[in-house]
Image (cartoon, rainbow, N blue to C red):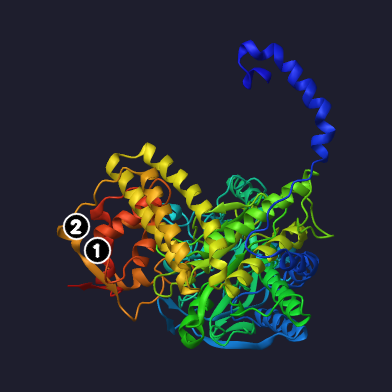
Amino acid sequence: MASAFFPRSSVARASQFWFLALATAPLAASAQRVTPIPLLGEPTVAALDNELSGSAAKRTVEFLAQLNRPRGSKTFQIASDHIASELTRYGLEGVSVIEIPADGRTMYGTEKARPAWDADFAELWEVRMDGGKPVDVVRIASFEDEPVTLAEDSDSGSVTAELIDVGAGTSESDYAGKNVKGKLVLISTQPAAAAPLAVDKYGAAGMVSYAQNQLTAWWGEDENLIRWGHLDSYSPRKTFSFMLSLKQARAMKARLAQGEHITLRATVRAARHPGQYRVVTAVIRGSDPKVSSEEIVFSCHLDHQRPGANDNASGCATILEVARALDKLVKDGRIPRPARTIRFIWPAEIEATMALFHYKPEMRAHFRAAVHMDMVGGNERTKAIFHVTRGPLSLPSFIYDVGRSFGAYVNSESDAFASGQGGKYPFVSTEGGKEALLADLADFTMGSDNIVYSEGSFRIPVIYLNDWPDRYIHTNYDSPANIDATKLERAAFIGAASALYIANLKSADVPALWAVMKEDALRRAAVVLEHRAVLPQDEGSVVARTYLTTERAYFASIADFAAIPDSVRKDADLFFARLEAMVGPLDKAPNATGDGALVFARTPAATGPMSLFVGYDYFSDHYKGPTPRLMSYQGLRGGGEDYIYETLNLVDGKRNARDIRDIVSAEYGPIPLDVVVEYLKALEAAGVVRSVK
């Protein structure tokens, strides 16, 4: 090891170095590391440290994880009533439950409301025939025991039938030589994908799926996991599917391969029906009449199959704890009431956020920034990495650097604490771990309601706190046993500190904020230089130009919240000039010609993203041409979904197609102009955008 750090001629002196190091080790170990507190004063940090409770948040996780929580269901209502009851008990203002139609027909921008879904009973038994009558042998699945065993949006049915293995069940060849009419089919894919052939065309009575989802390094490793399954929420088809573990499915497949006949009895009582999205909300009112109408929003998603502990009882419980703690600190006089209002929202994932934004536009109009929490409590067993995530390049905002600063602070404090070198504020729960947080301070990623807030129709910047990967996501093992109370407490602090700072931001705070932003801009400059090193000169210039434009936009966004002092503006001008010299040289941007000069604007009817994942696809429902290449394009740092999200976000009636191409290329990797133009024209054909002359 010594030769890795010293020249060969110095190896002899290395032993002296190691001797000195060992001799001074006790002194080094006793040195206390002090991390400067960013942005907030120590009294506020100390107050948050004393009040926030990861243990209290975990108690809420344990309660919610007892409930199967599909959107619009009776058990979702129990969950939302519990949140509302706790908010009332804590004494928050404006506690209410907003009910929004969820009927399978109403459009909320680009999202069609799904009908509510309730399941009362479902069991799957293996039976043997005795004198022509089925006799139960073993119960394979029970909704009462594990709701995940019944695919969401299953309908009632009752059948005793033979099980036929059809592989994936999504191609004609899977059914060759097999008669599945009136029988149950064993499939390896999601029920929604197999149903058009298995049920509609070949007449299967129902499905039994062992579909795997959420691909990670641990995919398929644990045979006992049962994964969440789905059927089409909107289809008139009436069918059902049970979900099995790999262990169960492999045993059945082996028996069937040996020629054995397996007979199953399936009973399901479930239905889709018109219902309501129930969105719980409450506020801590702002104190400054000039800005109290502006709101900083905490968001999560309350729906999920049971147990759904990390996804997403953890986020829901954590923002409930933030609401309790902040409200109590204000009422006790330990922190000042925030200048702006802080709002808390508990919707169903994405679809109810979209519904709320369109059903209550007067509420949404007050939202200035958001902190979104989706999966924030996984312990070492989940293999989760915690992320403090920025917004997209299409929506530059200083708030991302605020979130990053508090994430970095907890990283440093928790690391110092874990290594015995101090850490005055590590935010450790009495019921949680003591290890360092090691949060990834990450660039924009999609995956939750953050994509609605950040979307070009709404432009509400978001700090997104989330775990990924998680080996137990969407399975029966996503349980409270895998939740760390310390992790919840740290997520609560990062979110609470960020929201408080943004809610109170005033002109006098801008110099300190700008100091933080300059540090982060330099970190991003290093990444730009790395990218330039591997790109052709013209694409390197695109990255550098986009970086400089974005950094200036980050700075300019401060003015939406507070006046920027002249001294700070002058310093910023000098700083940006130095940045340009650092990341240059810059080629002049080419003039946009031909299709590159096309300019598009959004149409008012199609508000919201195209890349939602809750059952309805606005784009495919309104566009019947060939699939645009952008939808499957793979770039250096992103794939089709990333490109299509940002391409639409950047449509503003001012940028031309070349401008949009350059920004998405800088963000996700170079892409041909014609691929971007093709998608923009497809959006125009779908009525999402219109040409601007």
Q: Amino acid at mark 1?
A: Asn
Residue 628 as seen in the image, left or right of residue 235: left
Residue 592 is labelled as 2
x and y percentages locating residue 196 in the rendered image:
43, 66
Residue 496 as seen in the image, left or right of residue 433: left
x and y percentages locating residue 19 in the rendered image:
79, 21
**Residue at screen point 64% across, 62% down:** 375
Above or below: residue 375 compared with residue 559: above
Secondary structure, mark 2, is: loop
Kindly indicate the quadrant of the structure image that contains residue 478.
Answer: bottom right
Residue 656 is labelled as 1
Q: Pick whichever, 251 or 92, lies toward us.
A: 92
- Disc 2 packing (10 Å; few <14; some 14–19; many ≥20): few
Q: Amino acid at mark 2?
A: Ala
Above or below: residue 350 compared with residue 30: below
Secondary structure, mark 1, is: loop
